[in-house]
Amino acid sequence: AMGGLTDPRVTYWEPAKWIARLRATMTGGGPVLLRTNMGAGHGGASGRFNRLDEVAIAYAFALWAVGLTEKGEV
C-alpha cells in the first residue's frame, strides 16, 4: 500500500490501518509493504522522475514478492 502524507482525500493513516488489518487476518503469510511518501499528495509524487521512482519501487516489490529477485537485492 502506498500513500502520501499530505493527501487530503485518503489520509496517511488509512493505508496504515489497511496494512495492519491485512497482517492480522492473513493466514498464508506473504509480504506486505506500506510506503508513505512524505512529500506526496493524492496523485502521488509530483514531477516526472519522482513519479517514475514510485512506479519503480512498486515494480521492484512485485518482482521480489513473486521471487524473481534475490532477497537482498530489494
Image (spheres, rainbow, N blue to C red):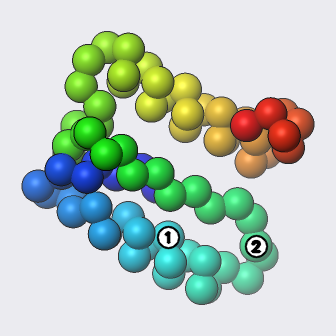
Q: Provide residue 27's location: percent of width, then percent of height.
A: 73, 82
Which kind of residue does numbered mark 1 sit on? Ile
Residue 57 vertical placement versus 25 (above, below): above
Q: Residue at x 36, y 22 (%)?
A: 50
Q: Quadrant of residue 22?
A: bottom right
Tell me the tag on residue 19: 1
Residue depicted at x 18% and y 51%: 7
Mark 2, secondary structure of its residue = loop
Mark 2 in CB contact with mark 1 (< 8 angstroms): no
Q: Position of residue 45 (x, y in %)?
A: 29, 31
Farthest top residue in view? 48
In the rendered image, the vertical position of residue 30 relative to residue 36, given as above or below: below
Vertical arrangement, residue 51 with respect to residue 30, above or below: above
* SS at badge 1: helix
Name which residue type carries label 2.
Gly
Count the numbered circles shown: 2
Front residue (pair 2, 28): 2
Q: Is residue 68 visible?
A: no
* Residue 62 percent location from the top left of the image: 66, 41
Q: What residue do we see at 60% from left, 32% from top?
A: 59
10 Å crowding of disc 1: few (<14), some (14-19), many (20+): some
Q: Horizontal and vertical percent for residue 55? A: 48, 28
In the picture as drawn, the residue positioned furthest to the left comes out as 8
- Residue 64 visible to an observer of this rendering: yes
Q: Which residue is mark 2?
A: 29
| Extreme residue in the right direction | 70
* Residue 63 relative to residue 41: left or right: right
Whole-number angstrom distance, CA of label 2 to CA of label 1: 13 Å
Which image quadrant: the C terminus?
Answer: top right
Mark sitting earlier along the chain (2/1): 1
